[in-house]
Amino acid sequence: MADLDDVKEGKNFAAEIPMEVRASAIRGANALDWGMQDRLSRIFQAGSGHTVMLAFDHGYFQGPATGLERLDLSIRPLIPYTDVLMCTRGGLRATIPTDSRKPVVLRCSGGMSVLTELSNELVAVDIEDAIRVNAAAITTNVYIGAEYEHQSLANLVKLIDTGNRYGIPTMAVTGVGKNMARDARYFGLATRICAEIGAQIVKSYFVDDGFEKVCAGCPVPIVIAGGKKLPEMEALQMAYHAIDQGAAGVDMGRNIFQSDCPIGMIEAVRAVVHGGEKPEKAIEIYSSAKAALH
Ligand code: 5RP
């Protein structure tokens, strides 16, 4: 039986201390519900507010992409070093241990391949399955200006609406059609459209000129894709400039798992993204890890 003596005067309500109202440190997240903010907080780290996502979802349209022939061998060893796993449900279930404790950004689109039109995607995962694998966020591509622009935006709308229903944020990936200009104007347009439609995170490519305007014009966090494999120093410079100009992190794949020292590379990327380390210092982390391999 409840303790009736507890209902009496004399409790300490500390009435003289104003109740603290905490704003979310994540851009655009203040008005989101608790579960949504909780999931975003698992993605963006408390200290830096940034994230290092490891992208290995390439197989959903590329099959066994170089470096991802065996996810168990290439990706599993990197799990301790990443903040987030970005992958397909097939890759996740088949190869990622359930005790990895890393939040998952789940690729929820598909339906095309490298042999066909890339923008011709559909939503390829039901929200129930995203919940079943405990996704921290769900993701699909948008192809602004491409043949199936409208369909890709409809896919995004569907993910956002179903994600909102269950408190799961959506990351919109700005895919680039074959003949699209990869400049700040294009990514400024594409990222802003995604945020206005309701995406809670937007993934963009980095551009050398005007990337700070892309970030400034997007009211939710931007993470950058790594793109094709670059020399390690160039990839670290790209990450550094992206963060310096307002990105909230990286969602990097090939520049990590195709490196000749993936653990050293992801540690170097972390130093840049979370520690603000300059590329010239961060490359030393990669170089010494590589030297230790031999
Ligand atoms: C494809 C994706 C991929 O996950 C992403 O582009 C891969 O990362 P990277 O470019 O760094 O290999 O979203 O649309």
Image (cartoon, rainbow, N blue to C red):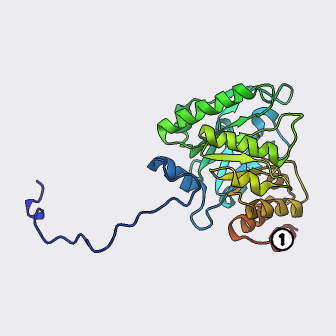
Residue pictured at 50% horizontal, 47% vertical: 36
Residue pictured at 64% horizontal, 53% vertical: 221
Is residue 289 toward the left or the right of residue 40 in the image? right
Residue 194: percent from the left, percent from the top? 67, 40
Q: Is residue 185 in view? A: yes
Is residue 20 toward the left or the right of residue 222 in the image? left
Q: Is residue 101 in view? A: no
The reply to whether the residue tagged 1 has its Cβ within 8 angstroms of ligand 1 is no
The crowd level at tag 1 (other Cα within 10 Å; few <14, some 14-19, many 20+) is few
Q: Nearer the viewer, residue 7 or 186?
A: 186
Residue 255 quadrant: bottom right
Number of marks drawn: 1
Residue 197 quadrant: top right
Location of the C terminus (image quadrant): bottom right
Q: Nearer the viewer, residue 177 or 5?
A: 177
Residue pictured at 59% horizontal, 55% vertical: 27
Residue 30: percent from the left, percent from the top? 50, 53
Q: Amino acid at mark 1?
A: Ala
Ligand 1 lies in quarter: top right
Residue 267: percent from the left, percent from the top? 74, 65
Location of residue 106 with respect to 249 vertically, above or below: above
Q: Which residue is mark 1?
A: 292
Location of residue 107 with respect to 183 vertically, above or below: above
Residue 129: percent from the left, percent from the top? 55, 33
Residue 171 quadrant: top right
Q: Nearer the viewer, residue 292 or 132?
A: 132
Q: Nearer the viewer, residue 107 or 21?
A: 21
